[in-house]
Image (cartoon, grey):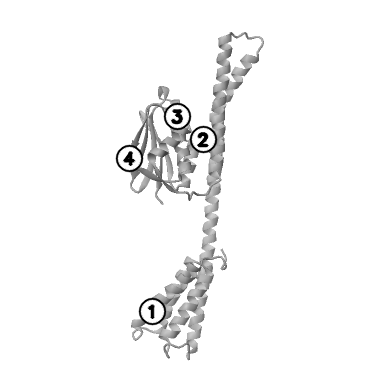
Amino acid sequence: MNKFTKPWGQYAVSAAVPAGIILLALPLREYITVSDVMLLGVACVAFIGFRFGKSEAIVASVTSVLFVDVLFVDPYYTLAVHNFDYFVSFGVMLAVGVFIAQLAQRNQLVELEKQATMRLKEREEIRANLLRSIGHDLRTPLGTVMGASSLLMEDSIVLSKSQQQEQISNIYQQSLILKNQIDKMLELSRIRDLQTTNDWLTLPCVDLVSSAFVRIKASQIDGFSVDYGMDSVKGDSALLEIALANLIDNASRHGSAPCKIQFSRIQTAYCLEVINGLGEQNKPQTDSGNGLGFLICDAIAKLHGGEFVFQKQSNQVSARICWEEQ
């Protein structure tokens, strides 16, 4: 952001802060020296330079010089300066402000580089998790499709009509699973393109649950109960709907009854949680840490400035998204 695009409010603050501080010191004019007041001006310039930038620091420096000269340098209420030392002090004030502003900008660049590095590492981690998920979640349906289709194509194996229908059904069902996984991959790709979400609304919890149910099969929501611990939450409606739908889908596919959707507050954070029993033979859920659905939920949680937590206990599992209200 250059000086031509910066908001004028920043320049107004840059002038108002030193002016206000120096005016507050005016009743003490008989007890403090000009140097003392200049130190106050330097402190203001340093703050403005660190908070905003070089051009604002220059504005603060000029404002400090003018107010100190007019209010604290004899003759008062004029711009006349008879002591050359004051010019030196004014120059030092300006130089300090510019130096601090440049130092602050350099620190900001370093911080931006660190953030970019962290985002790159995060993307690499997500990419690695995604590759593991693809290998894990797609291998079984692909193997089933290949096995069933090879049986149908093998001339030496004679299948009855019912056996053929069974293999065709297997191919169709596993194809649906593949389609679901590919849809999740595309959904995750779109979500990861976002850097943050600013589309925050107050969302009735009932509407959020209804919208999430629409995204999945009716058979998958049988047996789900909802604990509305609050009337509404604040967040991005589309993203939270996607996250909740993925949590419900995972619980219905890999868990067992009882299944519950729960809204709650943990201190100042909203929490959206899906709890379900362990799947068949206490089998861990497919999405335990590496699944596409949970990667989507983790990405949505981070876009809300929150976190996604998956926990497995002795007789149930829970998947929870928590985020602070903005």
Q: Residue at x 50, y 49 (%)?
A: 196
From the viewer's perspective, is the residue at label 2 or at label 1 nearer? 1
Q: Earlier in the sequence, mark 4 or mark 1?
A: 1
Q: Is residue 288 visible?
A: no
Vertical comparison of 289 with 175: above or below: below
Three-letter code, disc 2:
Leu
Work out whether residue 5 or residue 185 is closer to the camera in this orientation and state it.
5
Pointer 2 local density, CA inside 10 Å: few below 14, some 14–19, many at least 20 = many
Three-letter code, disc 4:
Gly
| Residue tagged 1 | 23
Pointer 3 local density, CA inside 10 Å: few below 14, some 14–19, many at least 20 = some
Q: Earlier in the sequence, mark 2 or mark 1?
A: 1
**Mark 3 vs 1: CB contact within 8 A:** no
Q: Earlier in the sequence, mark 4 or mark 2?
A: 4
Q: Residue at x 50, y 39 (%)?
A: 296
| Residue tagged 3 | 285
| Residue tagged 4 | 229
Work out whether residue 113 or residue 227 is closer to the camera in this orientation and state it.
227
Dot label at residue 292: 2
Per the image, label 3 sits on a secondary structure element best described as loop
Work out whether residue 95 or residue 258 is closer to the camera in this orientation and state it.
258
Question: As drawn, is 21 to the left or to the right of 177?
Answer: left
| CA distance for labels 4 and 3 | 26 Å
